[in-house]
Image (cartoon, rainbow, N blue to C red):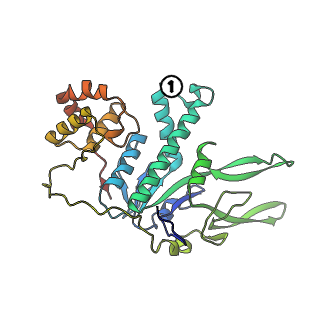
Amino acid sequence: MNISKGKRQLPYKVVIYGAEGIGKTTFASKFPAPVFIDTEDSTARMDGVDRFDGIKNLDEVILAIKTLKEEDHGYQTLVIDTFDKLELMINDKVCEEQKVTGIEAIGYGKGYTYVAEKVNKLLGALDALRMAKGMNIVIVCHAQMRKFEQPDEMGAYDRWELKLSKKAAPMVKEWADMVLFANYKTFVIKDGSSNKAQGGKRVMYTTHNPCWDAKNRDGLPDQCEFDFAPIAHLFGKTEQPKAEAPKKEKPKKKEEPELQPWSPDMNETEKKLFELMKTAKVTEDQVIVTFHEKGKFDGIMTIHEINDWEFIERSVIGNWDNFLKAVVKYGKANPFTK
């Protein structure tokens, strides 16, 4: 085990939140070589933005992250825009699994616990992508104002927070290296018997304040213009995580899909499944998408994570021709699109 000393410039984990329409998506698009998981079609009217098309549910988000982690590409930043919409997708997935119509119907607050578990797992997948590919991760959120009461003081005041659930918000803030709050800077002037707001300059806050959450570890000014320029110097060079030298492989025909190599700890059913996939030229991504569309093995990113091999033996291997028809119908991985 190596011991190192001094600074290491690793890829950043950034959260950007703020008022609607202030320009969060445009700001995120200025990060180095970004690709978007766009849950709200925020980039639909932006030219030159790369995005995954058709992100409508949690399974498709997980597949997009897996695609970035396993395939060759030139992207340096993944932007999730927005995470509050993604949390609603997670809510929908939990409700689907629990066979209820709303998260409150699960009872005793368990629904929010299940959501928090999936949020934690998703943040872990983003960390794995960051270290595997050296990518910055940028999360965009809306902001909301909540009444905050100090437990040991009198009175209460309003403060801006991430528009996430009470369990998800602190998890996302703790995960991030940098939390930036964007807002309009206004001031009030007296106009006769009434007060009027003036100003409206867009600014971003980089450090904590009783009225908002923000943080950074790079000595940024407490307040600066809401533009990428004040933080651009942080993204000049990032240290790429060390990786093993790639193994030399025999060239493959262009049309032949790349299959997951066998590993020593595969069971016999798993080996049989991969043999059938190889013969049919079916990729691991296509099989996983098909499982997700059929409501099986939620959240898995590799076949090796499957926990019901009797089902695979009986319903997949033993019913291979019909399963292949489902693969043709559902099993298409999300492509990169512009």
- Report the front residue among 211 and 315: 315
Q: Which residue is rendered at x = 23% and y = 37% of the image?
A: 271
Residue drawn at x 57%, y 25% as measured from the top left: 105
Q: What residue did someone put label 1 on?
A: 100
Query: Residue 336 at x, y = what percent?
Result: 31, 55
Q: Secondary structure at mark 1?
A: loop
Position of the C terminus, as image quadrant, is bottom left
The image quadrant of residue 329 is top left
Lateral position of residue 208 relative to residue 322, left or right:
right
Q: Residue furthest right?
A: 154
Residue 62: x, y in percent?
A: 40, 45
Residue 332 in the image, given as x and y percentages of width and height: 26, 43
Which residue occupies the foreground of this view, 7 or 169? 7
In this view, the residue farthest toward the front is 1
Q: Is residue 228 left or right of residue 37?
A: right
Residue 179 vertical placement versus 277 (above, below): below
| Three-letter amino acid code of the residue under disc 1 | Val
Position of 143 with respect to 69 (left or right) is: right
Residue 40 seen from this side: no
